[in-house]
Amino acid sequence: MVTAAPDVRTTEPVGDREPPALRPRRRWWPTPKVVIVAGAVGVVGYLAVVPLYYLIWGTFFDERGFTLDAFSRAYGDRDVGGLIANSLWFSVGAAILALVVGTALAYLQVRTDVPFKALFFAASIIPLIIPGILYTIAWIFLASRDIGLLNKLLEPVLGEGFFNIFSMWGMIWVEGLHLSPIVFLLMVAAFRSMDPSLEESALMCGASRLQVIRRITLPLVRPAVIAGVLIMMVRGLESFEVPTLLGLQNGIYVFTSRIYFILRVYPQDYGAAGALAVGLLVLAVVGVAVSTLASRSGATFQTITGKGFRPRPIQLGRWRPVAGAAILLYFLVTVILPLCVLLYMSLLGYYRAPSAEAFRSMSLDNYRQLAEMNRATTALKNSLLLGVGTATLVMAVMAIAAWIVVRSRIPGRQLVDQLAFLPLVIPGLVLGLALSFVYLRSPLPIYGTLLILLIAYCTRYMPYGIRYSVTSMHQVARELEESAHVSGASWWQTFRRVLLPLLAPGLLAGWVYILVVSFRELSSSILLYSPGNEVLSILIFEQYENGQFTVLSALGVVMVLTLVILVTLAYRLGARIGLRQD
Amino acid sequence: MSTWLAGRSVRVLAAGVVVTLAVSACSSPPTTGNDDQQNGPTAAEQLYAEIGALTGQQRRDRLVELAQEEGALDLYTSMNADVADAVAAEFSDAFDVDVNVYRAGSETVLQRILQEHAANYQGNDVVETNANDMFSLNSESLLGEYAGERRDMVPDAGRFDGWTATRFNLFAPSWNTELVPAGQEPKSWEDLADPKWDGKLSLELSDYDWFLTLYKYWQDNGKTDAEIDQLFSDMATGAKVAQGHTVQGELLSAGEFAVVASNYSYIVQRAKDRGAPVEYLPFVEPVIARPNGIGLMRNAKHPAAALLFADWLLEEGQEVLVDEGLTPAISPGADPLAGVEVIPVDVETLLSSSQEWSDRYEQLLTKGETVSG
């Protein structure tokens, strides 16, 4: 292998440097690599550019030409500074909470002999599945000062109204917990690909556990940490459900409430709303640039190398029961409590505090109503189709895109990273408008079919896909590909038989994430669906509008069950095709 | 090592960029507008005019015959799903015409129609949505004229250029009967300003139409602007702001609020029907009514079905709406609002200065003192 490398250096460059005049003119024929890479770049570019173009055009141009009026309308409000401050405070808080919780759990899960490992799976998926609106409402019923069950339960110990969900802390708590699975999934993939011998050597050299975590472990997973922070900051900034349900009651207004106020009156000022989105866009571009810089020192993070390693769990020793208790507590708080509220609510005619009378009134009426809803089956089928399709397509294309970004030397490769990430800040409604604009005019029969939803979902979830796959790619050392190539493998063979299996944990994590969240996508679906093509999130929205929160809860419970089964199957299948599982 | 990649890589990226540009170039700049709007009556409009002149059974028979030839009806609506489902099923059963329903929030319905129209796409034949959005559609010249006996029966407050009210949403205060003892409930709109509701009253984020109508009503009844501002300011003081009438209704049932200023009566009625401890009767007067209406599309693919649907919704359909707990435009039976003072939302003001009132309402809500808890 060592001797083979110079061969490559001496043969190919010479061929390339040959003066064209001396070489017989050869017709350039695209290799599979060229086709695949160009295809991936084309798909990423197309998906990102269409809505971006629409957004930028609508923001900077009106009938008279270029204008910045939209910005003064959007940011001219006297309180906009306060709104931005609230938004930042909220999103930074939620990001930190999610990061700490998600990372700690992922570390315990992958690297230690902590008990109750089976619970992690549920804890990482269920908060993602429960629609944001239901998760938030469940927390209102748990921790409102006036009607919160936890407050009632703990009143003898903590005094009256100890928890107050209608506060900045409450908002951070709910959003942070709801976001933590993203971090968990990212970090599990990162820790799994990390060679523990580095930590072991540090320990041997006399470093304490904490020192090892701080100086060895965390720096090694820095790309994943940065990706997590990036996603969560943007998500926090554009979050709408939690701030409206929890913030408004006490007059906490955020950046997104401004968008709401702007779009409330006719004619809707899409220019001003776009100007706000452009603000987020700038933030995201800076974020991706910073994360690229921070991950630049490439080899630093490459822990999957040609040398084999066998992750050996760290013995927690006397800390094992403590860690076990912490996990039980986390599981209780993020999964059991909210899910219990949903289950409880789904059995009632309307929400009321638990009492003998409430329990007597319980019935399965809400589930019956759900079963009688004939569109429910169609919607479930469509959602499954779209979820699996989106997750698979996005992760497949993003694996290639990640190779372009991290591995290739193609000039402008960072643009692919930027483009794939930017749709994260495009509001779903703007995306919906952009897509309907294009496909209403396209000769292809896409408008009014499921395909347009597939395109919308792929665009919306591409940013998560790229972060999951780029993060994984950073950890795979170049030498593995090189040896495959030297052994005569083509690019495609190397990609398929060496890279893909090594990337699998990260890709699967991304796949699961996208599958789960695509079940919840509403803001672009609502504009783009057509009769007969309803998806589950539309049904949820309808029940929400009907004020049928009890039926909604029943639907939430059914969704959790469906997706848990689906994801379990995915992991089982993953294990069968040789995916390393602890 | 990178050299085995570098040779063709520039071409690879270039190819990708070309694909991207080529595909995105296919879409023209996202300007909207459709120039064919004012060019004479469309085929659908001719049919509306021709059949609009007929009356009674003759009109119905002719419409049924033509609608069945057309075979389908595309309806866009912001009705709640259960109402829309019931309406579509009844209509379909009665005339053997398939109804395809697109259902979304009113702003989304409006957006969808505007988008489709700008691209000359005939998505719907008929639209049923909120007053604000019906006004917008009419001002974009998308609606055809609907004439007939049923329209003439709708009260003045429900007949507009291009569209006709089918139902009214009633704004009225509601309360939780476990938290508000009998006799303590609000009896006038002014009662809501009482400090006893601080921290217990909920206002809704988007109800500026309610706000401006009540404001004008008080002005007409001799209150000074200063007095009115004071009343609203007292309401907003310590108010808990919610977004969405349904969430507001649900939290009222659960006891998070004791009183809600301006929920729709039908939402409260539905919660009451499910056994929740909520009430809105006797009505605080005047009840403020906001119309929802129906309009026929100028470019309908199934104009006869559209016209038949409008006739039907204003006749047999009104009973379906009553069964679903809504307030119909033409009361089929005894008027449940007999003897109650009802005023319509001030549509003139809403149309001419919605931005101003939206801003004033936003300011009222955001400047309101915050309560802790």
Image (cartoon, rainbow, N blue to C red):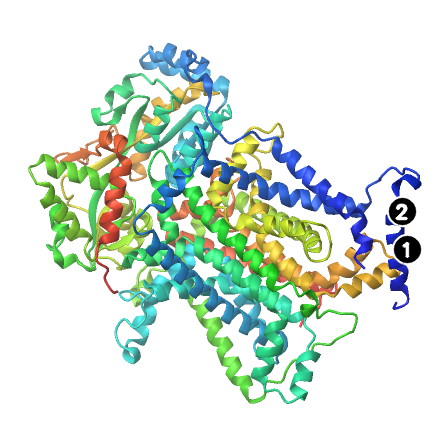
Rounded to the nearest angstrom, the CA distance separating label 2 from label 1 is 11 Å
Check disc 1 and report its element: helix, strand or loop: helix
- Where A412 falls versus A319 (above or below)? above
Residue type (three-letter) at the residue carrying disc 1: Thr
Residue A570 visible, this orientation: no
Quarter containing the N terminus of chain A:
bottom right
Residue B299: give x, y in percent of width and height. 45, 20
Check disc 2 and report its element: helix, strand or loop: loop
Residue drawn at x 59%, y 46% as measured from the top left = A458
- The reply, left or right, for residue A90 in relation to residue A409 is left
- Where B45 falls versus A421 (above or below)? above
- The reply, left or right, for residue A274 in relation to residue A203 is left
- The reply, left or right, for residue A467 in relation to residue B373 is right
Q: Which residue is mark 1?
A: A11
Q: Which residue is mark 2?
A: A18
| Number of residues whose C-alpha sits closer than 10 Å to that of mark 2, classed few (under 14), some (14–19) or many (20 or more) | few
Quarter containing the C terminus of chain A:
bottom right
Residue A376: give x, y in percent of width and height. 50, 45
- The reply, left or right, for residue A214 in relation to residue A67 is right
Q: Quadrant of residue B254?
A: bottom left
